[in-house]
Image (cartoon, rainbow, N blue to C red):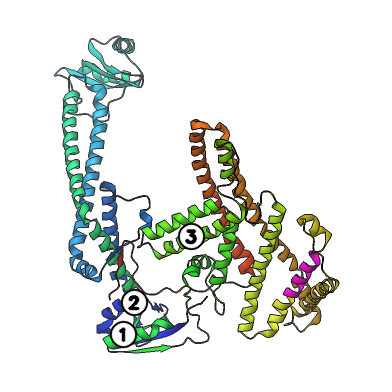
Amino acid sequence: MAVLKMQRLGICAWKKNRKQILELLQRKGVLDIDTDAVEDEVFQKTDTSEARGSFERDIQLAEHALEILQQYVPEQKGLLSSLEGRKEVDLESCRRMEAARDSVLEKARKLEELLKGVSDCESEIGKLENEKEALEPWKALEVPMNFPGTKRTKALIGTFPGTVSTDQLCEMIETRLPELSGYYAETVSADGAQSCVFVLAKKEEAEALEEALRAEGFARPSRVEAEKPAVRQEKLVREIEELGQKKEALEKEIVSYGDSREEFKLAADYFRMRLEKYEILGNLLQSKKTFLVTGYVPERAAADLARELSENFMLAVEVADPAEEDEPPVLLANKKVPSSFEGVVAAFGLPGKGEIDPTTIMSACYIFLFGLMLSDAAYGFVVFAACLAALLKFPRMEESMRKSLRMFMYCGISTMFWGVMFGSYFGDVVDVVSRTFFGHQVTIPAVWFVPLNDPMKMLVFSMLFGVIHLFLGLGMKGYMLLRDKKYLDFVCDVLFWYLLLVGLILILLPSGMFESISQMQFNFPPFLNLLAKVMAIGGAVGILLMSGRRKKNWALRVALGAYDLYGVTSWLSDVLSYSRLLALGLATGVIGSVINSMGSMLGGGIVGAIGFILVFLIGHSVNIGINLLGAYVHTNRLQYVEFFGKFYEGGGRPFNPFSIHTNYVKIKEEN
């Protein structure tokens, strides 16, 4: 377990070499550059907002081109494509992209224009479809919608709400205007919503007639055409077809850009790298001819970086240990197995200043407890095999995903171990299958015991494992105190607690209460019983008197000690928290057994076998998913609350080097 030692690195170089130096630092990816440098009369920061804005627009343009291609030429990806990782490209490809950036952006703009053309066609088609639909009730009208009438007549073309027949229309007119000398009225079409009518009257009577009809709900149409509705509909159909053909041609042209997908991906990442470089550039102090770079670099990489900078550029470079008041960023370095659990630690918080990296110890506890919670050998094998297969099949997988899969693979091994110890293989599938389909029961015996048959024994051992886990956390605190030569703190804050807790445990074990709960009997010799009481009393007195040792007032010291001593109740609740080991272990087994029983309800034979297989596959898939999630969540909780609560606070700043961050491609390192 290790937190890599950091060193301060400072560079003063000529501005003419700025581009090459920053590109070198970005490729190396080992320098966490300071971005909070203070300006003075000589060294100022450069405003790079305009350049950054340009790169952000270029990134958006390339990303939009990819979205357009994904819409019209979907990229074929498998179910596990997220595990494949990014495509590897060399630096030469990036250099070629720098030369071809304008042509690639022009392609992206062309795609946007084509998409806009498609959108315009769709919008226009929608308008024409609406117009065509609006003309549908009028298609039987033999005159244009804007027909005014003849030399002596005036046409009234409009609608009535509801259904109005020609006879009803004539009756309405004659009722309203019985003195009307003559007219022609016709209902062109009618449905439940409205009726379209055509009325022709003498010009001198038309105004009065229209006013009378309006009183009955008559309204002129909002849109009129200079053509007959049927003729206009035919034209609209042709226009829609032409627009559809134009849209199809534009879409085909968009599809033709499918081969440029990789160019757009590389362009987006290229501009992303440039954007990051200019973000850093805007935070560097610069004079007229020089610029400064300061930051943290891991000690193991500092000498090589300083040497490479000195060999390639004329500059001044300095490497030094951080000052006492500095708080360097945190970078963890562990061996292969513990490194898989660094994400669990980082999710809680990286080690703060003066803290140790708990990853190695925590990873061993994590594997142990996770397997104990899932505790089915077959489930463990499924998890192990799936993770191993993914790791072997996808060598370019992202490192964070690789670590997560390795973590679950190790937990799968632990689950297999505990499943064998408890005799659980897909629950009791061996018993059920042998009894149902072969007529005699075969049982794979547990190497240790079956928790379903002896839950109290499992509870006792769960609490025992919890005590060991908690004591280990307290021991980690003691180690840090001894490392920092705080011997009095070690005695008062660690040793006294060990004495009290061990003494209380030794007093509890031979008691009748423990015997009735655990069905286990302990008979200690008298001297051990006496020693247990001495340890408990001595630890309690030490805590009472020394927990508030930094206070000079004795009354206050005792009060603080009493409050701290009351914390023994939290130890009890912490130990009880480990009963979740029993609960989750039993849940896995019980649900698995229920699934097997449900599958066997159809009995033997072909029908029973088919039914059992279906229930088995669906039921155990759901069970392994639910209990895998439960084991993950509750194992994390035991680490974060119970274990870390004894010695670890976290809060360290993660090491964030200036490096190449890309979404689509991975830049190969130069040899």
Q: Which mark is residue 28?
A: 2
Looking at the image, do the residues carrying marks 1 and 3 touch, with CB atoms under 8 Å apart?
no
Q: Amino acid at mark 3?
A: Met
Residue 147 showing in the rendered view: no
> How far across and how far down the image is residue 402, in percent?
42, 63
Q: Amino acid at mark 2?
A: Lys
The crowd level at tag 3 (other Cα within 10 Å; few <14, some 14-19, many 20+) is: many
Residue pictured at 70% horizontal, 51% vertical: 454
SS at circle 1: helix
Looking at the image, do the residues carrying marks 2 and 1 touch, with CB atoms under 8 Å apart?
yes
- Please name the residue that numbered disc 3 is placed on: 409
Q: Amino acid at mark 1?
A: Glu
Instruction: Tell which of 648 and 64 is nearer to you.
Output: 648
Q: Earlier in the sequence, mark 2 or mark 3?
A: 2
Left/right placement of residue 153 relative to residue 305 reads left
- Please name the residue that numbered disc 1 is placed on: 308
Residue segment shown in magenta: 498-509
